[in-house]
Image: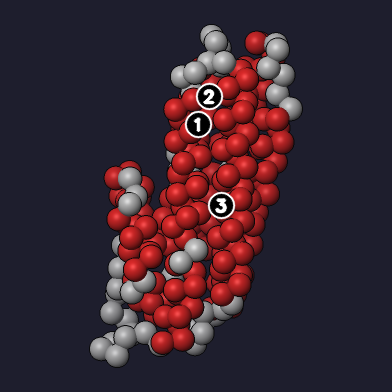
Amino acid sequence: MEGTDPVNKKLAAALSGGAVLVVALSGCTSSSNSGDKGPDPKLVAWAKSVCDAVPAQNAKIKAANAAISTTAAAGKPETLQKTDSQAFQDMSDGYKAIAVAISGAGAPPGVEGGAQRQQDVVKSFNSLSVSYADLKKKVDELDTKNQAKFASELHDVAAQMTELEKKHQSSIDALQKLQQGEVEDAIAEQASCKKDASATSPSASSTTGAMTG
């Protein structure tokens, strides 16, 4: 449908950085800060509990991004609404699940300031989850019977997505702080995180490398 295709592509472009927030946690490489003995076993166990929860949610968020990008060319309001609504729901659920996993793991043991860093990540991901749930609600309320109105309202959704960039950056910053020092070493030992990192797209991997390098 003329008018909605460019708008939905803009929406898809706005979503393209979403998966990076999850990938960032799994993109670590050992910095050898913990010496020859390696990180504390308790910290390794903590990292495992977090890393084991990452791949499934990462896949869900990336699939949601892909669904919106794929459907952007469809043009039919009903199809766009259904796909975007489900994608936003999946992203909301994915970020919420990551927050729950990190919250449930507790503060990284033996890490100075670890509790605050953990809480900051949980707070930022919960905030993203709420934001995507709000976007889903807005998409569900779109008027698919009126072409001009639908395009206008979809444009507003895309604009709101762009405004979420600050929350995305806040989450990235919180993850970076959480995975400093021995936490980074402990995460680097986790097979689930290594597997998840190897499955990332080239664009996501390069962005992650810049964040964690």
What residue did someone put label 3 on?
94
Query: Looking at numbered disc 3 in the image, what kind of residue is underneath it?
Result: Gly
Q: How many marks?
A: 3
Inter-mark Cα distance, 3 to 1: 16 Å
Other-residue count near label 1 (Cα within 10 Å), few / some / many at <14 / 14–19 / ≥20: many
Q: Residue at x 45, y 74 (%)?
A: 47
In x, y percent, where is residue 118? 56, 71
At numbered mark 1, what does the secondary structure look like: helix, strand or loop? Answer: helix
What residue did someone put label 2 on?
8
Residue 166 falls left or right of residue 23:
right
Inter-mark Cα distance, 3 to 2: 22 Å
Pick the quarter of the image with the N terminus.
top right
In x, y percent, where is residue 163? 59, 39
Q: Residue at x 70, y 24 (%)?
A: 142
In x, y percent, where is residue 188? 34, 71
Name the residue nearer the viewer: 133 or 128.
133
Query: Looking at numbered disc 1 in the image, what kind of residue is underneath it?
Result: Ile
What residue did someone put label 1 on?
68
Residue 69 falls left or right of residue 146:
left
Which comes before the other along the chain, label 2 or label 1?
A: 2
Name the residue nearer the viewer: 187 or 45.
45
Q: Residue at x 25, y 89 (%)?
A: 36
In x, y percent, where is residue 6? 49, 18
